[in-house]
Image (cartoon, rainbow, N blue to C red):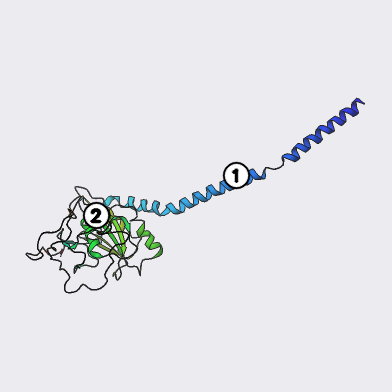
Amino acid sequence: MANGTTRKKGSAVKAARGSVVTKKGTPWGTIIAVVAIVALAASVIIYYMVQSAPKREQAGREQAAASFAPTASDPDPSKRIPGVVTANYTGSVHVLPTERVAYDKTPPFGGPHDGYWATCTGTVYPNAVRTENMVHSLEHGAVWIAYNPQQVTGDALNLLKVRVQGKPFTMMSPYPGLDKPISLQSWGHQLKLDDANDPRIDEFIAALRSNPNGVYPEVGASCDALGPGQFDPDNPPPFDPSKPGPDAKPMDYKGTAGAQNEQGGMNQQPSSGAPAPSATPSK
């Protein structure tokens, strides 16, 4: 009897254990939740890597161009960049928002300009902007990347944008009719290029953006937005593709009385009188 009872108890214990195991089963809910978390984390990492790739690549380009940063012994490193064209221009010559200038270069990189500067705080303008405002920003130490919208699109356009977005004293806009795909301007300097991958873009920016060594007239001037009624970056004055008429101001213009000046007042000098020196290409 004892043996029989013992066998029955053993069978009951085994059955109970089997019942517990059966009830516990595989924790599919936990497994699915863990898999979902891992997949989400992986997707976030992949998204970050894809989205940050342009910035990381740009950081590499900037590091490669670091040797073109200006120093006291090398005040204008752009002189070492093949293809850079230079000219001498007189600064602080302002015209009214209703006036045009007959510029000597396309795009211009110096000369008379609107009394209100274009915002140049890493600004990417989707549409072409009035040239006279853009030139004023060059006087403040900005670099302007202009591009032909018929020739620069897609990945090439994104390559230019990443060099500008969030970068102080930098701006970018389409320039209809441009004779090259890309043209870089700083005050008195220009570089025209065919390829958005060209390392000279980063060298030009490194050499001339906010260069403190007197390569542009108004060191320390602002690039900040002026706002509605002056220059609104969200609604900037549009580019005029037509040829300047006979009333356009010449490159040796002295400035319009009543035009905005850098101190927030108006120009007092008359528009007549001895002309300012003409822009002449550097040798």
Helix, strand or loop under label 1: helix
Whether residue 200 is visible here, answered yes or no, is no
Q: Three-letter amino acid code at disc 1?
A: Val
**Along the line of sight, the residue nearer the viewer: 257 or 249:** 257
Q: Quadrant of residue 159?
A: bottom left
Q: From this viewpoint, which residue is outermost toward the front?
A: 229
Residue, disc 2 = 208
- Of the two numbered discs 2 and 1 in the rendering, the one whose residue sits closer to the viewer: 1
Which residue appears at 63% of the width and 43% of the height?
A: 30
Helix, strand or loop under label 2: helix
Q: Residue 66, how many percent across, how many down?
A: 29, 50
In the picture provided, is 237 more to the left or to the right than 156? left
Q: Quadrant of residue 105?
A: bottom left
**Along the line of sight, the residue nearer the viewer: 137 or 55:** 137
Q: CA distance from mark 2 to mark 1?
A: 53 Å
CA neighbours of label 1 inside 10 A, class few (<14), some (14 to 19), many (20+) = few
Q: Three-letter amino acid code at disc 2?
A: Leu
Q: Quadrant of residue 150?
A: bottom left
Q: Which mark is residue 214?
A: none
In the picture provided, is 282 more to the left or to the right than 27? left
Q: Earlier in the sequence, mark 2 or mark 1?
A: 1
Q: Residue 24, how many percent across, how many down?
A: 72, 39
Q: Residue 205, how many percent across, how many down?
A: 28, 55
Query: Which quadrant is home to the N terminus?
Result: top right
Q: Which mark is residue 34?
A: 1
Q: Residue 92, how many percent across, how many down?
A: 15, 58
**Along the line of sight, the residue nearer the viewer: 6 or 83:** 6
Residue 178, compared with residue 200, is above or below; it is below
Q: Could you tell me how many numbered marks the image carries?
A: 2
Query: Which quadrant is home to the C terminus?
Result: bottom left
